[in-house]
Amino acid sequence: MSAQHCEGTIRLQTSGGNLDLADVKGNVRATTSGGHVGGTNVTGDLQARTSGGNIDFDNMNGSLAASTSGGNIHVTINPAKFVDLSNSGGNITLELPKDKGMDLNISGDQVHSTAMTNFKGDVDKHRISGSLNGGGVSVKVDGNGGSVHLSFR
């Protein structure tokens, strides 16, 4: 199932198929039990959930709550209010803007990050917790069962 060039309140739900979003703006909820959820150029508030697939969003602007039980998560986002990612069976890759104020709460079996300038907090191999550029947008990542890779552009 796909949504392209749409704007407004959008609800996509399937029990076993993939959900693809392209050039979508608004309040979006995309849920599937067995497929992947992904897209490009999504602007607004997005909730994405799958039980058995990957989540993959590129060039996103807005807020994102996403979870999967059996896949990987890959997100490139300029966050507005929050980012909340959780995973119980795969890896998480998150790319964020380097100059934005954020409060980071990142955990996983292993947590890897590129260099963070203007960071105050704690970093170890399982967790990053603190503020970047004075804090601001809440970024929570729970990579239970996998590695988290954090980078900045």
Image: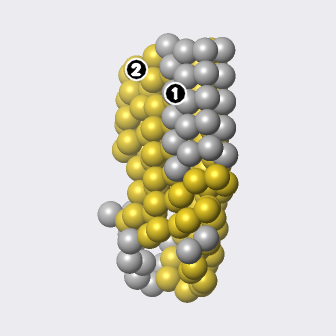
Is disc 2 surrounded by few (<14), some (14 to 19) or many (20+) residues within 10 Å?
Answer: some
Q: Distance between the residues labelled 1 and 2?
A: 16 Å
Is disc 1 surrounded by few (<14), some (14 to 19) or many (20+) residues within 10 Å?
Answer: many
Residue located 61% across and 36% down the image: 70
Pick the quarter of the image with the C terminus: bottom left
Q: How did the renderer colour the structure?
A: secondary structure
Residue 14 percent coordinates (x, y): 62, 15
In this view, 10 is above or below 100? above
Kindly identify which residue carries mark 1: 36
Residue 106 percent coordinates (x, y): 60, 65
Q: What residue type is labelled 2?
A: Gln
Residue located 46% across and 19% down the image: 3
Quarter-of-image position of residue 110: bottom right
Q: Which amino acid does label 1 sit on?
A: His
Kindly identify which residue carries mark 2: 4
Does residue 117 appear anywhere in the picture? Answer: yes
Quarter-of-image position of residue 41: top left
In this view, 13 is above or below 47? above
Residue 46 percent coordinates (x, y): 58, 38
Disc 1 to disc 2: CB gap under 8 Å: no
Quarter-of-image position of residue 17: top right
Helix, strand or loop under label 1? loop
Single out the mark in the foreground, 1 or 2.
Answer: 1
Q: Earlier in the sequence, mark 1 or mark 2?
A: 2
Nearer to us in this view, 4 or 37 = 37
Residue located 45% across and 84% down the image: 118
